[in-house]
Image (cartoon, rainbow, N blue to C red):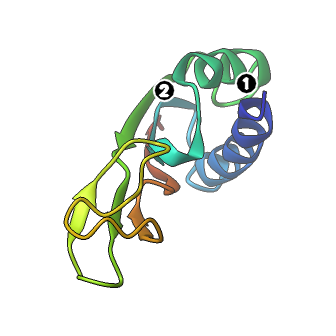
Amino acid sequence: MHEFGLMSSILDTVNSSAAEAGASRVVEIRLTIGEMAQVVEEAMVFALEALSEGTLCEGAKLTIDFIEPRSRCPECGVEFEHGFYNRACPECGNPLTDIIAGKEMYIDSIEVDI
């Protein structure tokens, strides 16, 4: 379950930023994660609850915006959305396409109480 490692790193960053801002607590953590990262939302929520005890993030709400996988064909240039496994170009059939979206993972914002 790689979500615990991910959430541990996220909490390090969020707790540090919140403390530097003089926050009394973190109200919400908003993330953007690409579907190709294979992150399970429920596991992230569980990891947040388990790892945030006694920190500024304890009790914070977690909001995750998932990004659909999107690729570009280097042969014909078409851009298209696809599932996790089928990345072949729908125009020319090229199986070797370049992922241009869906692997992102970043903290969008945090909401804090001062």
Q: Is residue 20 left or right of residue 87?
A: right
Q: Nearer the viewer, residue 94 or 113?
A: 94
Relative to residue 53, is residue 39 drawn left or right? left
Image position, residue 82 (x, y; %): 33, 48
Residue at mark 1: 52
State the residue in front, 4 or 61: 4
State the residue in front, 53 or 114. 53
Residue 24, above or below 45: below
Label 2 Cα crowd, 10 Å radius (few <14 / some 14-19 / many 20+) = some
Q: Are marks 2 and 1 in contact (CB under 8 Å)?
A: no
Residue furthest to the front in view is 93
Q: Residue at x 66, y 31 (%)?
A: 56
Q: Residue 101 sits in which quadrant?
A: bottom left
Per the image, label 1 sits on a secondary structure element best described as: loop
The image quarter containing residue 6 is top right
Residue sitting at x 39%, y 42%:
83
Disc 2 versus disc 1: nearer the observer: 2
Q: Residue at x 38, y 59 (%)?
A: 88
Please say whether residue 54 is visible from this viewpoint: no
Depth check: 25 or 68 in front? Answer: 68
Q: Give the alpha-carbon distance from disc 2 to disc 1, as whole Å.
A: 12 Å
Numbered label attached to residue 89: none
Badge 2 marks a residue whose secondary structure is strand
Residue bearing mark 2: 62
At x 77% / y 35%, what residue is drawn?
A: 2
Where is residue 68 drawn, in percent x and y? 33, 46
- Percent across and percent down for residue 110 are 46, 43
Identified by mark 1, the residue type is Ser
